[in-house]
Amino acid sequence: MTGPNSSPSSVSDQSLESASSALIKARKEIAKTVFGQDTVIEYTLATLISGGHALLIGVPGLAKTLLVETAATVLGLSSNRIQCTPDLMPADVLGTEVLEEDHNGKRHFRFIPGPVFTQFLMADEINRASPRTQSALLQAMQEREVSIGGHRHALPAPFHVLATQNPIEQEGTYPLPEAQLDRFLMQIDVDYPDADAERHMMLVTTTSREEPVATVLDAQRLLEIQSLVRDMPIGESVVDSILALVRAGRPGTDAPDLINDYVLWAPGPRASQALMLATRAKALLEGRETPSIDDVAALAEPVLKHRMELNYKAQAAGVTKAKIIQALVDAL
């Protein structure tokens, strides 16, 4: 069954097959250097081909930075890295205007772009940046442009932010505001690799022989794939499942007791949009022509987790966001 924007003839089988083949190659290239993180790689690629930003959360040493650097190389994108600290100023990220004088003595301002003017921006430990600097990034993430000295400057296309956070060390940090969290398409939790992957990592990374990764895509091809994702057909049953899942997580008279008892604030419409794109992207990554309800279930946690907050009652009862989201998924 099809619905709005889901005409089977809107995307050719050849286009889907070509894009899926390129993404499979990209996934394999990234896995050459990032071991034991297959799900993280999948979610990262799904975020990028959806045109979104990702928040990577994990303790130090789990290859978050390596993942970002490798993905930029494989996708053929220009990249910059910002190490966020409390004294990082908006101008250090966006750029600044300097006053210059030409040979005729006439003065004028010249704009010097900051590191945000790239296609792939890594914001390392983003919660260490001050709220003022975080807000500067918010405009870049949402509008793909920045305002300096009253002038708007467009960012390169595509433009993606992959930010990292350490979930343990919270001293000297500034929690991201809800508005900025909502701009991340997914929160990707990076866990420890299994024993086999860690053993392979030990053997490969402690030798002088490194296997280089190849560039599989370029910026133009990525933009084409992002457009393809938006044109992919999606069934009415999947659309209804996304809508039911997101709306069921909001407190109200019709919400389950679990939601009314423990949820402080819940996902808004941007969560539904993110799930629509992410399920299409996941299907394309797996070589399928259309997403399924299983894709909705698989992506519910990374798409919804950072878009909701639980109250103190939930903390006292040991109720987590993962448990809440799993209950919503089970209800489907």
Image: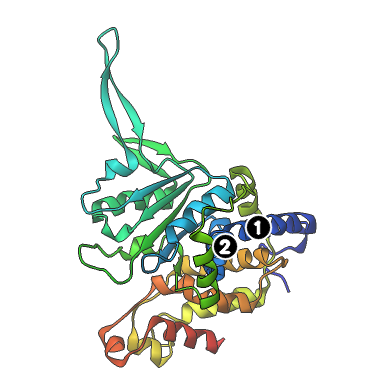
Give the residue displayed 41% in from the left and 80% down from the top: 250
Please state, as top left, top right, bottom left or bottom right, where the N terminus lies in the image: bottom right
Label 1, label 2: how far apart the Cα atoms are: 10 Å
Q: How many marks?
A: 2
Q: Which residue is mark 1?
A: 23
Rendering coords of residue 101 (x, y %):
26, 15
Quadrant of the rendered structure where residue 189 is?
A: bottom left
Q: Is residue 207 above or below residue 323?
A: above
Q: Are marks 1 and 2 in contact (CB under 8 Å)?
A: no
User: Crowding at label 2, few (<14), some or many (≥20) Cα neighbours within 10 Å?
Assistant: many
Give the residue displayed 49% in from the left and 73% down from the top: 193
Residue at disc 2, secondary structure: helix
Q: Is residue 187 left or right of residue 27?
A: left
Rendering coords of residue 206 (x, y %):
48, 60
* Residue 43 - label: none
Is residue 258 visible in this depiction of the protein? yes
Q: Is residue 152 above or below residue 267?
A: above
Please state, as top left, top right, bottom left or bottom right, where the C terminus lies in the image: bottom right
Q: Is residue 31 left or right of residue 149?
A: right
Q: Is residue 62 left or right of residue 133?
A: right
Looking at numbered disc 1 in the image, what kind of residue is underneath it?
Leu
Rendering coords of residue 50 (x, y %):
56, 58
**Mark 1 or mark 2: which is in front?**
1
Is residue 11 visible in this depiction of the protein? no
Q: Which residue is mark 2?
A: 46
